[in-house]
Amino acid sequence: VEIVFSFLMPLMWLITKRLHWVLLLPLLGYAYSGAADFRVLQWSFDFVFGLVLFAERERLARWIEILPGILQIGLVLLGLALFAAPTSLIKTPPEILRVATGCALCLLAVLYIPSVRRIFETRPLTKLGQVSYSLYLVHFPILLLVAPHITSAATPWRNLLAVLITVVPLSLLASELG
């Protein structure tokens, strides 16, 4: 996914910057239809939403600023609900669209609602943000190396706990070294 979008992103940015992001909607429609031959297009929701959030940042900031507090809270809750609702590993276009929409709403909240932004400006979360890319790069190889040795046929919760106790600290350590 990352490699394909490394090539597509400059084109998508150029369309957004020189013309208008609305011209990317046919790509989303094609991806949503499931007609795409490769699953990469299905992840275009995340990238297009990111471009739209950037291109419309001033307008979105003004819009959220004038929202009453209760609607700002609603925006946060809706974003979390859409993002965190159970899925079948985010395999279908509707699930991908739901999760991408939830992520976009959560990102809007972090960027433009001061009380939410303050939470993400705390020292632990700022530090996590500083290592997030290297953490992203190292976590999967560590998971592949460690998980077979620490998981069993026991309960899924025990396996999850074992992975969290080992893979997360090892990944954080490896990301710090990187």
Image (spheres, rainbow, N blue to C red):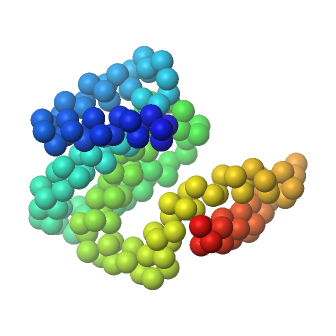
> Does the image show residue 157?
no
Give the quarter of the image for residue 31.
top left
User: Which residue is the extreme one toward the bottom?
Assistant: 123
- Residue 47 % position (x, y): 35, 42
Q: Is residue 112 above or below residue 52?
A: below
**Residue at horizontal 35 percent and vertical 34 percent from the top:** 8
- Residue 119 % position (x, y): 39, 76
- Residue 18 % position (x, y): 13, 39
**Residue at horizontal 33 percent and vertical 51 percent from the top:** 104
Q: In this view, does 70 lie above or below 29?
A: below
Q: Is residue 144 above or below residue 123?
A: above
**Residue at horizontal 23 percent and vertical 45 percent from the top:** 52
Q: Indicate left or right for 80 with 136 as reference.
A: left
Quadrant containing the C terminus in the rendered view? bottom right
- Residue 17 % position (x, y): 16, 43
Q: Indicate left or right for 102 with 89 as reference.
A: left
Q: Indicate left or right for 100 with 29 as reference.
A: right
